[in-house]
Image (cartoon, rainbow, N blue to C red):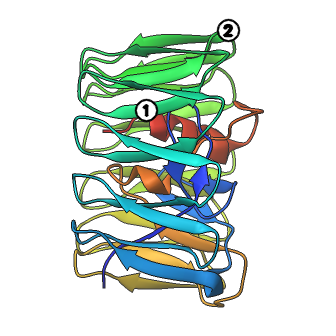
Amino acid sequence: MKKISLMSLVLTIGMMLALPTAYGQTTDGLVVHLEKDHATDTFNMGHDGHLIAFPQSGFRTIEGRDGRLIAYPGTGYRTDWGSDGRMIAFPQSGFRITEGRDGRLIAFPDTGYRTDWGSDGHMIAFPQSGFRTTEGRDGRLIAFPDTGYRTDWGSDGRMIAFPQSGFRTIQGRDGRLIAYPDTGYRTDQGSDGRMIAFPQSGYRTIEGRDGRLIAYPDTGYRTVLGQDGRILSYHYSATAPSSFLYADKNELNLLLQLEKGFPNNNFEDYLIYRYLADQD
């Protein structure tokens, strides 16, 4: 079984990422909750061997020079790629693009946003007001609200930002620091040393052959193991408007950030934000 990416374009801060709907959640930064009816999907594959799923109507696909296939709405969007060969899609109006020193192209709103990059060469875009930036020892630049948030990093050098109150941090054996609510959540890690946080009740965990631990609801969900050793969990009703998918840090098309109203008190939204700042 190949990894599946459920595709649709969602407006984000800093880049266009692919998801099936305009809303998603995570419990631990590794599992994404997608409100989606899978019965209407079409499947296709790029030359990189990565399988994607996208709505049967109203979408088209295009492949970047890196062999990665993306799906995007058939009207109102245009595409471009950076010197790294990665293709992106973004609205025809109201957006501009810029490329980081690492060759990655990002799209962002043409008003109210500014850009900067870290010493690793990766470009980010963030609101002109109400946000500040800081760089981790690994050279990654992150943007975060200038009030109500604080920063810290793990021994791997990655910087994270999280609310000043109501959150705690913990580091996995891999050196990555995560932040999670100080009530109602617990933590665990897989044999790969990556730490995850998930609700204390109503969830269970399972580890893939690759050592990655995921958390998922303890009722109504099944798990499946891919040939690459990664576990994913999904709702076993094909028409139920929900599914859980494993999201790799290099599979940015499985992650999103809400365009407006962020950050807010929704822990899942915050984790998505932190995870995007943590991207490769």
Q: Pointer 1: residues within 10 angstroms few (<14), some, or many (20+)?
A: many
Q: Identify which amino acid the numbered label 1 is placed on.
A: Ile
Q: Work out which quarter of the rendered image holds the C terminus and state it.
A: top left
Query: 95 and 160: which one is in front?
Result: 95
Percent across and percent down for residue 266 are 73, 42
Q: Identify which amino acid the numbered label 2 is placed on.
A: Ser
What residue is shown at x 62% (from left), y 42% (from top)? 11
**Mark 1, residue position:** 106
Of the residues tagged 2 and 1, which is closer to the observer?
Answer: 1
What residue is shown at x 57% (from left), y 67% (from top)? 59
What residue is shown at x 46% (from left), y 83% (from top)? 223
Q: Residue furthest bottom?
A: 237
Q: Pointer 2: residues within 10 angstroms few (<14), some, or many (20+)?
A: few
Query: 133 and 69: which one is in front?
Result: 69
SS at badge 1: strand
Percent across and percent down for residue 65 are 22, 52
**Mark 2, residue position:** 129
Q: Is residue 79 above or below residue 143?
A: below
SS at badge 2: loop
Image check: 240 left or right of 175? right
Residue 164 at least partly seen: yes
Percent across and percent down for residue 212 are 31, 63
Residue 215 at least partly seen: no
Image check: 214 left or right of 243? left
Query: 55 and 168: which one is in front?
Result: 55
Q: Is residue 202 above or below residue 88?
A: below
